Image (tube, helix red, strand yellow):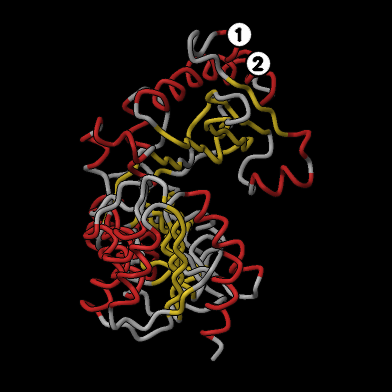
Amino acid sequence: MNIHEYQAKRLLHSYGAPIAGGVAIYSAEQAEEWAKKMPGPLYVVKSQIHAGGRGKGKFKELGDDAAGGVRLARSVEEVVQNVKEMLGNTLVTKQTGPEGKQVNRLYIEDGADIDRELYLSILIDRTVGRPAFVVSTEGGMDIEAVAEETPEKIFTLPIDPIKGMTDADSRKLNRALKLTKDAAKDGMELFPILYKAFTEKDMSLLEVNPLIVMKDGRLRVLDAKVSFDGNALFRHDDIMALRDLSEEDEKEIEASKHDLAYVALDGNIGCMVNGAGLAMATMDIIKQYGEEPANFLDVGGGATTEKVTAAFKIITADPKVKGILVNIFGGIMKCDVIAEGVVKAVKDVGLKVPLVVRLEGTNVEKGKQIINDSDVDVIAADDLDDAAQKIVKAIKG
């Protein structure tokens, strides 16, 4: 689960991280009221959407010559004008895709005198099975570009989960980020704070880009991106309360209600598969034959007929879907359960696109019999390769 920047900053500040003063607003009237209370003379107006690249983004309604989704203002009047231009419009960034995201809230923040911009994140390093800091002196840039062009400028520090964050770890990060004097003192306090927040709140990613050294020599969290492990949210009612459903795909919201692992993609072939590995292989082979998957959907090993029916309905609700591939290898999951769910879903919602079904494993003959005895128009496939070729051929007519 993702949260907005201002929510992430409030959370980190509750642990003691230094942030600028700021307020989330939903109207130009609120913007004027709160900006007058801020010290000025420099303000920052930030679009709040669940996507990066906001500063370089463009609003669909304003044209390419307009300023991006993060703007500086030097008066209350300029703050209000920016808010009127940004609020309610659609911001397109590298991470939103061409459709963009509507900006429903903004964050107005005190400006900062920046001396240096640094990069810092904490994530789970699966190569060592530990949380790890990833830091760089090249803050404010896409870390992917830094990793590709100047990988020597990235420093990774795994943290022993038994010992936790030590002073020695903090000193290593200070050296990697070339922090001295007051900034180094702040680092000794800040790095353990961030690690504590990461572990206590079951975060999957904590990214501060940039972490700045101000001209007075002190550190400040200037931007923050936080994602949480969805499997641990049952422990954190306070985090669940921060969820913004308007930022999530409606199909993904519906899938979560049925405990389905679903991620919407940009392709045209809907996929329903059991098992994450098989789902990835299914998407790969669709691409191999020249088309794109419309989703990742893992119904899991213990799905019921009702769960399969819900999954099928979610797939067919996507207007981009031109064909559907059901690929089931029955182990714990039984092929007859999948077949019953598919038949029920087709009867409930109708079928307006080609459907290819590949069944193999537990109760496969029962599953095939259920489909054969129904009046559902299904293209049967013998194996995954055969299924991929048939669905691609079918949507091409």
Label 2 neighbour load within 10 Å: few <14, some 14-19, many 20+: few
Is residue 144 in view from this perspective? Answer: yes
Percent position of residue 242, x then y: 26, 44
Q: Is residue 296 left or right of residue 280?
A: left
Is residue 46 in view from this perspective? Answer: no
On residue 172, the disc is 2
- Cβ–Cβ below 8 Å for labels 2 and 1? yes
Query: Under tag 1, what secondary structure?
Result: helix
Query: Under tag 2, what secondary structure?
Result: helix
Label 1 neighbour load within 10 Å: few <14, some 14-19, many 20+: few
Percent position of residue 47, x then y: 40, 58
On residue 168, the disc is 1
Q: Which quadrant would residue 291 be assigned to in this image? A: bottom right
Mark 1 belongs to which amino acid? Ala
Q: Is residue 119 left or right of residue 298?
A: right
Which quadrant would the N terminus be assigned to in this image?
top left
Residue at screen point 38% across, 57% down: 262
Q: Is residue 369 left or right of residue 52?
A: left
Mark 2 belongs to which amino acid? Lys
